[in-house]
Amino acid sequence: MDLQNFDIDQFLREYWQKKPLLIRNAFRDWQNPLEPNELAGLACEEEIESRLICQTDAGWEMEQGPLAEERLSGLHESHWTLLVQAVDHHVPAVADLIAPFRFIPNWRIDDVMVSLAADQGGVGPHFDQYDVFLIQGLGRRRWQIGGHCDADTLLLEHADLKLLSQFEVTEEWVLEPGDVLYVPPGIAHNGVAVGSDCMTYSVGFRAPSRADLLGHYVDDVLDGIPDDELYRDPGLTAQANAGEILPEALARLQQMVLESLSDPAHFARWFGTFNSTPKYPDMDWRPEVPVEADEVREAIAASVPLSRNPASRLAFVTTDADALMLFADGVCFDCHGETAALAKDLCAADSVVLDVEMAGNAAAIDLLTQLCNNGCIAFDSED
């Protein structure tokens, strides 16, 4: 699936994290990948994150899933929206919607949220902290765009929803099936269903905050610092006022902190592990019966396709000319030579057919066996 009527270089240059862009007829022969009743069924599952947002006479109301079938079947004919998170983890056809947007690095991809709305249904005027491509899958939705928002923007008082207290529309479009709207971070927007069975697929991207990076990285660094690394000042001289913390002391103290945080190799290994941690770590995707190395060899020799679990996060950092660190769902694997090339292939494509000669590479077989048993990848064996 490729985007049409779309210039990647122009988009990255003029729109990415700058301003919204509407792409009409973005896909040739668009086919909606999920039926409304299928999405409703996912919202009833215990392990899947979902929300129901209704606009009533009393205001906006939100219910967290899982939702009972009776609740969904008893909804009114208008003014409600069902939101289901990470549908790409469970429905391969929805996961395929990410492929056209892989000109953005994989490590920035979050998930595909799917919304189902009745007539006039929406979640209210709001802004997000992340980039999103909004694909109109079924029915029609009116999207209104406003100005830029930040932490000082006034919000309505609501326990569950962050809705704008004021929303001034600057642009407005009605999207048809197959249309795509890109909205950058911080831009106010509001989507309202025009008619029933309105389905929108939100391909979302993530960006770590400075607070998250610093907080988690410092925790990791602290784990490796010996207790005996204390402040030292062997060149100490008498000072006029013992109560003053001198600039020289402050500089030495700050340098102690900065030195602990300034190891690029340590940061790269930590960030790859941190960033590749699954969004829902409690979900267990491991095979019921562990995969044996001989099974991996046989599958490679038989040219059985190897597919990545849509819920898995794979990325790599190059460390040398023929070496890299492969990160797979929070685990780091050091790869060299042919195994490094294999790791790149696994990160580049959702599905690959490996060279049969790979069956004789012990390091590659070991890596693939571990990834299979961790639930990151699987051979598409019909039996």
Image: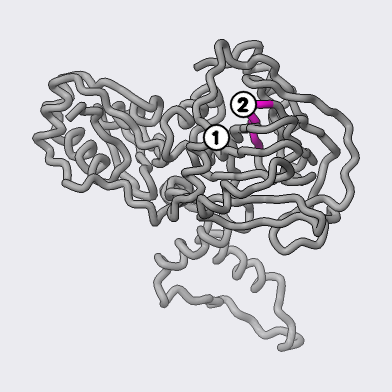
Residue 267 at x, y = what percent? 47, 50
> Is 137 covered by the magenta stretch?
yes
In depth, the one of 170 and 7 nearer the eye is: 170
Toward which corner of the image does residue 360 lie, by quadrant?
top left
- Outermost residue on the bottom side: it is 242
Please name the residue that numbered disc 1 is placed on: 36
For label 2, the SS is strand
Residue 32 horizontal side relative to residue 90, left or right: right
Q: Nearer the viewer, residue 11 or 234?
A: 11
The residue under label 1 is which amino acid type? Pro
- Residue 65 to residue 176: above or below: below
Question: Three-letter amino acid code at disc 2?
Answer: Leu
Report x, y in % for residue 312.
Answer: 39, 41
Which residue appears at 60% of the width and 26% of the height? 137
Q: Residues within 10 Å of mark 2 (few under 14, many from 20)?
A: many
Task: Give whichever of 239, 118 is nearer the camera.
Answer: 118
Instruction: Report the side of 308 relative to 233 (left or right).
Output: left
Mark 1, other Cα within 10 Å: few <14 / some 14–19 / many ≥20? some
Instruction: Name the side, left or right, on which 162 lies relative to 311.
Output: right
Residue 294 percent across, percent down from the top left: 9, 35
Q: Are marks 1 and 2 in contact (CB under 8 Å)?
A: yes
In the picture, measured across the screen, residue 232 lies left or right of residue 8, that is left
User: Which span of residues is magenta-colored?
Assistant: 131-139
Whether the magenta-drawn stretch holds residue 333 is answered as no
What number is the disc on residue 136?
none
Report the predominant secondary structure element of the magenta stretch.
strand
Q: Residue 224, located in which quarter of the rendered image?
A: bottom left
Residue at 50% across / 26% down in the picture? 33
Helix, strand or loop at label 1? It is: helix
Give the mark nearest the N terminus, 1 or 2: 1
Q: Report the residue marked by disc 2.
A: 138
